[in-house]
Image (cartoon, rainbow, N blue to C red):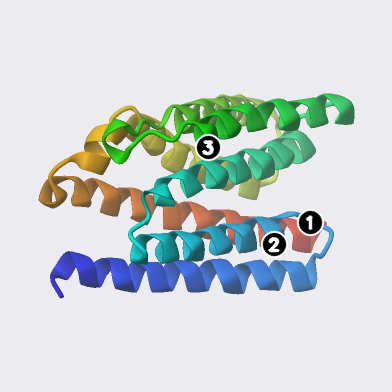
């Protein structure tokens, strides 16, 4: 086993353990809040991805489309509940419209050589726009919950990086492993930082509520 394979083994173990433990803790403590279900849903997708990869199924990448819709669902909830005021009907319409990129991608069964992440770009762009608007709104206030700002920075770090990476996804999927693996490693570390920031800060927010 080379160093990169060892890294992914350790990283996936740590990431999946974190998602499962944090998800169950939130569900146990705050059953009505969706964050626990968001983390456990991401955990299930991670396990499914590992199984698909082990079985050498190319559909492994399409699980990411479902994962990105999960991101869209939860982060839309977060922004519209804590930062912006939006009518519930308008929110539900956005959730329904938001599933369109995922459905189109799942129906687009290209071979691995033709894989593109257009749906990732759409979701990342929407989340980034909401994040910039949220930061702008927060800093305009004389008093605000700092944990919301930390969450926004965590979102900005991961989805900003991911938005850039998504444009070169075909190369990252089909390129030379020794080169692209380091980009995937950086993305994975920032992703873990995002999950940690989101979980710790949300716990503090809910504890003070």
Marks 3 and 2, how far apart in space? 25 Å
Q: Secondary structure at mark 1?
A: loop
Is 8 on the left or on the right of 206, as rendered? left
- Residue 16 vs 39, above or below: the answer is below
Which of these two is toward me, 184 or 1? Answer: 1
| Label 1: few (<14), some (14–19) or many (≥20) C-alpha neighbours in 10 Å | few
Q: Position of residue 29 (x, y in %)?
A: 78, 71
Q: Which residue corresponds to mark 2?
A: 36
Q: Quadrant of the C terminus?
A: bottom right
- Residue 160 vs 185, above or below: the answer is above
Q: Earlier in the sequence, mark 3 or mark 2?
A: 2
Q: Are marks 2 and 1 in contact (CB under 8 Å)?
A: yes
Q: Are marks 3 and 2 in contact (CB under 8 Å)?
A: no
Q: Residue at x 76, y 63 (%)?
A: 207
Q: Residue at x 21, y 68 (%)?
A: 5
Q: Quadrant of residue 70?
A: top right
Q: Quadrant of the N terminus?
A: bottom left
Q: Residue 106's mark?
A: 3
Q: Position of residue 117 (x, y in %)?
A: 40, 32
| Label 3: few (<14), some (14–19) or many (≥20) C-alpha neighbours in 10 Å | some
Q: Position of residue 203 (x, y in %)?
A: 68, 62
Nearer the observer: mark 3 or 2; the answer is 3
Residue 149 seen from this side: no
Marks 3 and 1, how far apart in space? 28 Å
Q: Quadrant of residue 171?
A: top left
Q: Residue at x 71, y 67 (%)?
A: 26
Q: Which residue corresponds to mark 1?
A: 33
């Amino acid at each position: 086993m080379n160093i990169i394979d060892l890294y992914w083994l350790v990283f996936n173990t740590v990431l999946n353990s974190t998602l499962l433990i944090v998800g169950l803790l939130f569900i146990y403590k705050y059953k009505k809040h969706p964050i626990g279900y968001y983390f456990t849903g991401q955990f299930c997708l991670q396990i499914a991805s590992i199984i698909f990869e082990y079985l050498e199924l190319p559909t492994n990448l399409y699980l990411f489309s479902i994962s990105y819709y999960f991101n869209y669902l939860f982060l839309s909830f977060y922004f519209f509940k804590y930062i912006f005021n939006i009518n519930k009907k308008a929110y539900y319409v956005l959730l329904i419209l938001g599933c369109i990129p995922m459905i189109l991608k799942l129906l687009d069964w290209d071979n691995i050589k033709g894989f593109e992440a257009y749906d990732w770009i759409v979701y990342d762009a929407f989340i980034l726009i909401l994040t910039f608007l949220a930061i702008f709104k927060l800093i305009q206030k004389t008093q605000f919950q700092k944990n919301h700002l930390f969450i926004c920075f965590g979102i900005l770090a991961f989805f900003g990086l991911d938005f850039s990476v998504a444009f070169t996804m075909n190369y990252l999927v089909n390129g030379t492993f020794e080169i692209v693996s380091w980009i995937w490693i950086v993305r994975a570390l920032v992703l873990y930082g995002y999950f940690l920031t989101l979980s710790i800060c949300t716990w503090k927010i809910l504890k003070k509520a």
